[in-house]
Image (spheres, rainbow, N blue to C red):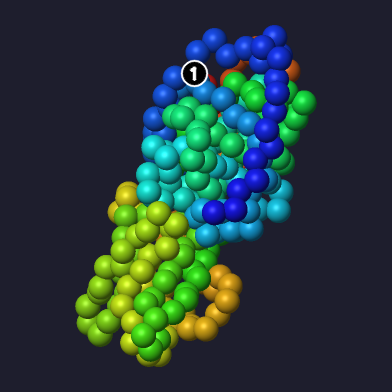
Amino acid sequence: MNRRHLRWVVPAATVVVASVVAVVLVTQAGGSAACAAGGSASYYTAGRNGMCNLGTPADGAYAAVGRAEYAGGKGCGTLLDVTGPNGTTRVQVVDLCPGCPAGKIDLGKGAFAKIGSLGAGVIPVTYATARDPAVGPLRVKIKGGKGYSSLSVVVDNHGNPLSTVELQQGAGFTALSHGEDNTWTGPSGLDGAVALRISDVYGHQALVSGLAFGQSDFQQTTQHLYGGPSPAPSPSTVESPSPSPSPSAVPAGVGTTAPPVKC
């Protein structure tokens, strides 16, 4: 795994975090993030694909999480609403941070700059997963599957954590095995186009057919895993303590800056 961290030496007086406790990523219905315990964030530059093999958004709206929250790859592709001193931004989990304890995350530089000062290096944050976040149609990368090469699948734009990816074979389906690198692997010796049934932990399901072998990049589909996704919080910054505004109905996606979640 190719991860290049920016290491910081920060005077104790610069960043004061009263307490850093374990964060449990929790969700609530309606697309908004539920409240989370406090933690901290630094920023780094991810490798080309990140541990999740999803690539990294050009605007830096991505994150690496510790092993507990990475959950052997189950956290890959989910979206986090991260609140810092200057506001909230939405990022996609694309990487593993092996040295991060629970409550500590690494953000892409662009995301970090939206919610805190780059000069600080480390800032106090809260963060939580978003349920049914606004995402584009599913994207699927297919490798192998023909001859003696095992099928390897990576799915993007699923929003919620995935529960299963299944290969359609005749009238039935074969479950693929999910690895820590976020690849779903299956049988070899396949022929023709690939059809996959993709399901998330909330029961949303989509059948994606017509996927081709031999493509080096993600194949864009026209299907969403769920319909009517709720928007991310509306853009805002935090200048002084005040009551949180009511949720906005303006659609937004990964990288959107927003007010902190009211707990």
* Name of the residue lying farthest toward the left: 172
**Where 163 falls versus 154 (above or below)?**
above
Other-residue count near label 1 (Cα within 10 Å), few / some / many at <14 / 14–19 / ≥20 = some
Q: Secondary structure at mark 1?
A: loop
**x and y, in percent, of residue 106 in the image:** 59, 37
Residue 220 in view, yes or no: no
Residue 107 in view, yes or no: yes
Q: Quadrant of the N terminus?
A: bottom right
**Where 94 falls versus 105 (above or below)?**
below
Amino acid type, residue under disc 1 in the picture: Val
Where is residue 86, by image quadrant?
A: top right
**x and y, in percent, of residue 78 in the image:** 47, 47
Instruction: Give left or right: position of 175 versus 225.
Output: left
Where is residue 169, by image quadrant?
A: bottom left
Q: Residue at x 48, y 83 (%)?
A: 212
**Where 172 falls versus 123 (above or below)?**
below
Q: Residue at x 31, y 78 (%)?
A: 187
Residue occupied by mark 1: 20
Instruction: Give left or right: position of 247 versus 187.
Output: right
**x and y, in percent, of residue 25 in the image:** 41, 34
Instruction: Give left or right: position of 192 versus 114.
Output: left
Q: Residue at x 66, y 15 (%)?
A: 15
Q: Nearer the viewer, residue 25 or 65?
A: 65
* Name of the residue lying farthest toward the right: 119
**Where 190 falls versus 165 (above or below)?**
below
Q: Residue at x 50, y 45 (%)?
A: 96
**x and y, in percent, of residue 214 in the image:** 52, 83
